[in-house]
Amino acid sequence: MRAIAFIFARGGSKGLPGKNIRPLCGKPLIAWSIEHARAVSRIARVIVSTDSEEIAAVARDYGAEVPFIRPADLARDESPEWLAWRHALEFVRSEESRLPDAMVSVPATAPLRFPEDIERCLDLFAEGDSDVVITVSASHRSPYFNMVREFGNGTVGLVIPPATSISRRQDVPEVFDMATVAYVARPEFVLERNAVFEGRVKAIKLPLERAIDIDSLYDFRLAEFLMQSKEHN
């Protein structure tokens, strides 16, 4: 199986400006994801898709390819990343005259993953019978038990009311948070469909401490603390 990894990193982050190249434990944030992807032997190429020349320069310094600059209309706040996935795959198809067997998205915002986490996603994808493999971690809240929504009259209620009264979290279906550790997708599916859950999706379960997704300064500081901890190392 020939896989190509892509790291999609816009320059215009609002939650934490400049986060993709912000130094984290001695390296720019994006460098961790580049190194994780390069450590996976089944990944033939590591390509960064960005609209920022500054991010592109840092990515090249750490061994990634940046063979194109992402068009501005695919890098706005409201631009679906799915379209950037398509753009990257179409570039590869035009350059190589074929698609890879697997597209691997390795987000820059999950620096605490291990390369083995990507390997597990590829293993599950290689078994067949899935269009996309995602990563998940245990959720601290459940829509059946302690997640609520607000109604028009100002009251609140469970997001998914159970058929009978439930007093223990253990009695409701287990739910998970999607993580941004890695995605493995069938390229043809990405080009033909419009969202992950339009296809057959499987998941790899990961511990919460490796599934931190950096979107704010709080997330960044938490990731830095965990990365420096003896347990993570």
Image (spheres, rainbow, N blue to C red):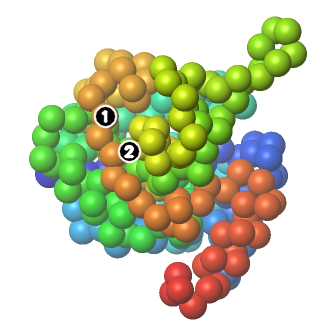
Residue 95 lies, in percent from the top left, at 31, 39
Q: Is residue 105 visible?
A: no
* Residue at far right of view: 154
Q: Nearer the viewer, residue 178 or 52?
A: 178
Residue 178 lies, in percent from the top left, at 50, 44
To which residue does mark 2 refer?
134
**Neighbours of disc 1 within 10 Å: few (<14), some (14-19), many (20+):** some
To which residue does mark 1 refer?
201
Figure check: 77 above or below 32: above
Q: Where on the picture, by quarter, is residue 206?
A: bottom left
Q: Residue at x 45, y 42 (%)?
A: 171
Figure check: 222 above or below 13: below
Secondary structure under the numbered disc 1 in the rendered image? strand
Residue 138 lies, in percent from the top left, at 49, 53
Q: In the visual, does 218 lie left or right of 24? A: right
Pointer 2 with pointer 1, Cβ within 8 A: yes
Q: Nearer the viewer, residue 158 or 39?
A: 158
Q: Is residue 181 visible?
A: yes
- Which label is found at residue 29? none
Query: Mark 1 is on which residue type?
Result: Val
Residue 155 lies, in percent from the top left, at 82, 18
Q: In the visual, does 95 lie left or right of 139? A: left
Q: Earlier in the sequence, mark 2 or mark 1?
A: 2
Q: In the visual, does 126 lie left or right of 211? A: left
Secondary structure under the numbered disc 2 in the rendered image? strand
